Image (cartoon, coloured by chain):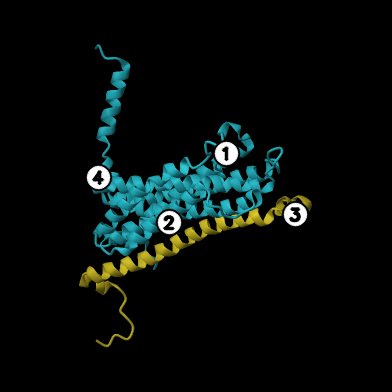
Chain colours: A cyan, B yellow
């Protein structure tokens, strides 16, 4: 009595959240089979989204964009370039977040997650640089320029490589985890730099090759496959990160009894 | 049909740029999946070998396995 429905709902939600044992999922032993069950789903979603998006992107869009200075067929590189660039930044954020959680709570699985995400992030960063070069050549007349966004994205690529190299250079896994986590968190400074490395205040004083674009101004036949490819790449990242995570879990927990059971079940005869 | 297919390959004269970008992208993604599958097999074998080294099976379990060939001992 005297309680509003909203208060009751909030209390019920709170009790539900408290009764779920979240730390159960933070244990490598229980997340190993969960990740294994999720991989086929993420792979399937990724394949479907990429195929449908590319079909729309190649066959349901105009061959040419813009008026006085048109972007011809090469603009279709947008369907991989922009999603890959978004994933390169998003996965770095994920890498740094798991690193921070690992440092704060000292949970093993968090560091393993960070480890599992890094190579996929590095691959998407390389893809965004590579596809940008093959878009830049026909549109700007050059494969590469020391433009702020290109330069900062290149530094992001080196940060991924640096994280992977630093981690593999330290034999003690716990030290490697902590050193890598610090590097990943310090490297976070690159994300806002990449994000805002467009548009200079006075175009006669300086020129950034990437200009701000308004998603509302993009035609739906281009925006929708671009977003579809982004979700597809995201789903792909889940699948590859979980697959890599399973390998990391087995390697690090090799001494425990549950891993021996897994080996008995899953090892090739 | 043949015309539209060759148009698709041609990409209005920008085939080199379009297919270089798409080819390397999907080449890398497929290579990553292939590498992960290979790594999984390697890890299962290596961790299994470690487990057998550190935790040898009990003699009862060992005797149930088929005898090794040419055992003179």
Q: Residue at x 40, y 49 (%)?
A: A37
**Vertically, is A101 above or below A157?**
above
Instruction: Residue A58: give its label.
Output: none
Quadrant for the N terminus of chain A in the image:
top left
- Foreground label between 4 and 1: 1
Visible residue check, residue A184:
yes
Circle 2 chain? A
Height in image: A72 above or below A265? above
The residue carrying mark 2 is: A158
Q: Are marks 3 and 2 on the same chain?
A: no
Q: Which residue is mark 1?
A: A203
> Residue at label 3?
B6
Q: Residue at x 64, y 52 (%)?
A: A141
Circles 4 and 1: CB distance less than 8 Å? no
The x and y percentages for residue A180 are: 32, 55
Secondary structure beneath disc 2? helix
Cα gap from disc 3 to disc 2, whole angstroms: 39 Å
| SS assignment at label 4 | helix
């Amino acid at each position: 009595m005297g309680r509003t429905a909203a208060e009751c709902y909030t209390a019920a939600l709170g009790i539900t959240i408290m009764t779920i044992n979240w730390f159960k999922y933070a244990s490598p032993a229980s997340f190993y089979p969960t990740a294994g069950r999720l991989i086929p789903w993420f792979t399937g979603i990724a394949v479907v989204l990429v195929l449908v998006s590319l079909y729309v992107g190649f066959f349901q869009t105009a061959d040419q964009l813009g008026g006085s200075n048109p972007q011809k067929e090469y603009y279709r590189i947008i369907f991989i370039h922009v999603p890959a660039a978004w994933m390169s930044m998003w996965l770095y954020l994920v890498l740094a977040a798991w690193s921070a959680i690992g440092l704060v709570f000292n949970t093993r699985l968090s560091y393993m997650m960070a480890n599992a995400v890094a190579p996929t992030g590095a691959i998407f960063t390389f893809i965004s640089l590579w596809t940008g070069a093959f878009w830049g050549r026909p549109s700007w007349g050059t494969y590469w320029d020391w433009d702020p966004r290109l330069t900062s994205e290149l530094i992001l690529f080196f940060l991924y490589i640096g994280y992977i190299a630093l981690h593999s250079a330290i034999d003690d896994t716990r030290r490697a985890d902590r050193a890598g986590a610090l590097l990943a968190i310090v490297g976070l400074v690159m994300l806002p730099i990449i994000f805002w490395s467009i548009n200079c205040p006075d175009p006669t004083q300086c020129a950034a090759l990437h200009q701000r674009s308004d998603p509302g101004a993009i035609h739906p036949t281009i925006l929708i496959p671009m977003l579809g490819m982004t979700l597809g790449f995201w789903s792909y990242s889940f699948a590859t990160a979980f697959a890599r995570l399973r390998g990391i879990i087995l390697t690090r927990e090799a001494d425990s009894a549950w891993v021996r059971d897994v080996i008995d079940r899953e090892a090739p005869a | 049909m043949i015309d539209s297919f060759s148009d698709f390959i041609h990409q209005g004269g920008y085939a080199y740029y379009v297919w270089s970008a798409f080819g390397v992208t999907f080449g890398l993604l497929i290579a990553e999946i292939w590498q992960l599958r290979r790594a999984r097999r390697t890890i299962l074998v290596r961790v299994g070998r470690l487990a057998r080294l550190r935790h040898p099976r009990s003699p009862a379990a060992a005797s149930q396995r088929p005898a090794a060939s040419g055992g003179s001992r």
